[in-house]
Image: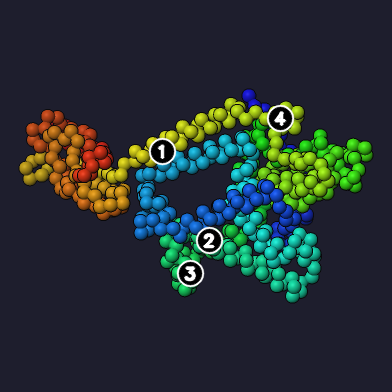
Amino acid sequence: MSERIPVQIIERVEPSRANVKVKSSDNLIHTRSFTGLFRNLRVSGAGFLFLLFFGTVWLDWGGRQAVLWDLADSKFHIFGATFWPQDFILLSALLIICAFGLFAITVFAGRVWCGYTCPQSSWTWIFMWCEKLTEGERNQRIKLQAAPWGVNKLLRRSAKHSLWLAISVLTGLTFVGYFTPIRPLANELLTLQLSGVSLFWVLFFAGATYINAGWLREAVCMHMCPYARFQSVMFDKDTLTVSYDAARGENRGPRKREVDPASVGLGDCIDCQMCVQVCPTGIDIRDGLQMECIGCAACIDACDSIMDKMGYARGLVSYTSEAVLQGGQTRLLRPRLIGYCAVLLVMIGALVLALVERPMVSLDVSKDRGLFRENSQGQIENIYSLKIINKTQQRQQYHLTLVDGDGFQLQGKTEVSLAAGEIFDFPVSVTMIAEHPSSGSQTISFEVVDSDDASVRSLAKSRFVAPLNR
Ligand code: SF4
Ligand code: SF4
């Protein structure tokens, strides 16, 4: 059984009404920029995410937008496949798989999702890059913040907010473009002809982006994201987390490069604060693992560059486990991780099977509210409303029958030709012939079969209501 490792609660001055600052552009955390392996990984992760988000919406597939959630018709198109409300169980399964995937990754490597691919982190990094572009490096930004308002400050701030707003509107437009075809939407926006509803949602998501990535930033991770709250429950002694090696780093303190730290009673930490200055959540990793840490590894890059300059071995701050810090070794294969991976594999297998076996025609039957009626020949008759959906991308011909329908007659349309994705609603009646062997209500089954491929079929059951004494 794996032991959990504690997430430190660092003592802070309790905020009171008097000292709680409203978050504004004047109290943003000004991070120092840096380069390094993990920064490059993060740029790659965010770049991939942006490409996926901003690029996919413009792709076409089979004469239609490749990924489109058509709310009006309750259909989800994705690269030539169309999913209907009846298929949304598959979407739920996919979300559960994603959740288990996140659990497995968290058990293995902590909050890598937060650090590398979470949209909140990725958009925040982009907004921070805009800040650096318009207001300069960390020191210049701090000076600008302290400076009185003047032309320089006004121009730089305006440029920053203009860039933020441009990215926000583009994000809002792209997001709405996954629900409303993007090309007409963009055209309407450019020609100022956007409908009120579309304009509302574009502005809503643009506003959310501007506020979350520009102003709230780490506050979203600390106070709004539920994952930050429960992720520590999944950590164990073998989970890889960004950690400071206190045994090696303490006692911390400045020294000259040529001085042997041991000779002056110091460890390898020169107390330069670089790891704090690059941290997007403004914490000091030397205080231990904290809830605010999003696992971005910016402090690893920063500290490694300092270690290089000092001629010390890298890794004073590194991805490591509690087990290693206590002198042991990280166990990669452990029951909890194996359990998550096994469940994940089973669920992925089941989802793939369900997708392959997904019926490409759907049949819904609902019985008319009247119980039954007697027709002119004295036969008992029930009325049903049928709905057939052609889930394929081609026109199909279908044949409707009653399964095991001895003693019943189906009357109405039994041959139906439907265009790709077409939904067809129509009434049919079923009569119980006089020679029917039994009386009273019973279950009947309707089946629709593809005329070209008998393996494509869908069955739907209903009740046939009849008096008992016939
Ligand atoms: S960057 Fe490294 S050396 Fe500098 S304060 Fe942080 S842990 Fe110490
Ligand atoms: S402590 Fe390090 S890994 Fe954690 S958020 Fe700050 S910079 Fe990123």
In terms of image quadrants, where is residue 352? top left
Label 3 near ligand 2 (CB < 8 Å): no
The residue at the point 77 percent across, 48 percent down is 305
Upstream in sequence: badge 1 or badge 4: 4
Location of residue 22 with respect to 377 vertically, above or below: below
Which residue is outermost to the left?
377
Residue 302 is labelled as: none
Task: Say what amino acid the circle numbered 3 marks.
Answer: Leu
Left or right, 458 with reference to 350: left
Which residue is outermost to the top?
1
Q: Position of residue 44 (x, y in %)?
A: 60, 51
* CA–CA distance in space, label 1 to label 4: 37 Å
Task: Say what amino acid the circle numbered 1 marks.
Answer: Val
* CA–CA distance in space, label 1 to label 2: 32 Å
In terms of image quadrants, where is residue 235? top right
CB within 8 Å, label 4 to label 2: no
Residue 172 is labelled as: 2
Observer-side mark, 3 or 1, equals 1
Upstream in sequence: badge 4 or badge 3: 3
Residue 323 is labelled as: 4
What residue is shown with label 1?
352
The residue at the point 41 percent across, 42 percent down is 90
What residue is shown with label 3?
189
Q: Position of residue 463 (x, y in %)?
A: 23, 37
In terms of image quadrants, where is residue 285? top right
Task: Say what amino acid the circle numbered 4 marks.
Answer: Ala
Upstream in sequence: badge 3 or badge 1: 3
Q: Quick one: SS at disc 1?
A: helix
Q: Mark 4, residues whose alpha carbon is within 10 Å: few (<14), some, or many (≥20)?
A: some
Q: Mark 3, residues whose alpha carbon is within 10 Å: few (<14), some, or many (≥20)?
A: some
- Quadrant assignment for the N terminus: top right
